[in-house]
Amino acid sequence: MIDALKEEEIVNKVGGRFKLSTLIQKRLAAINSGARALVTCDSTNPMEVVVQEILQDKIYLDSSNKVQITGAGDETVGPPELDLSDL
């Protein structure tokens, strides 16, 4: 298990366990879909990369629970939304 997840620091940084879980899941989905890591990490484990991105304040959840990159304006990070209106 990743040691940082045992600490309250990461939970408090994000704003609670639910938000932490949501942020991790959404960012993992983005990385697994081909998004680049925002930090340099010795590990190839995507979960460790996401935890480091959170600890280094590179990503956060906005008020609508979308993953945002710190300092990137309104650019969301995650898999593209599907437009089902044409079906």
Image (tube, helix red, strand yellow):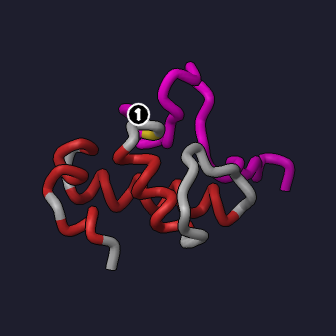
Q: Residue at x 54, y 57 (%)?
A: 41
Q: Position of residue 2 (x, y in %)?
A: 33, 72
Which image quarter is the C terminus in? bottom right
Q: Which region of the structure is painted magenta?
A: 60-87
Q: Position of residue 74 (x, y in %)?
A: 57, 23
Let me know if residue 62 is in the magenta part.
yes
Residue toward you, 22 or 24: 24
Q: Residue at x 70, y 52 (%)?
A: 35
Let me know if residue 81 is in the magenta part.
yes
Q: Check disc 1: other Cα within 10 Å, few if <14, some if 14-19, many if 20+.
A: few
Q: Amino acid at mark 1?
A: Asp
Q: Is the stretch drawn in magenta largely helix, strand or loop?
A: loop
Residue toward you, 85 or 39: 39
Q: Residue at x 49, y 42 (%)?
A: 67
Horizontally, residue 19 falls left or right of residue 39, namely left
Horizontally, residue 23 falls left or right of residue 42, namely left
Tell me if residue 8 comes above or below residue 2 in the rendering.
above
Q: Residue furthest left?
A: 8
> Can you identify the residue that label 1 sits on?
62
Horizontally, residue 27 falls left or right of residue 52, namely right
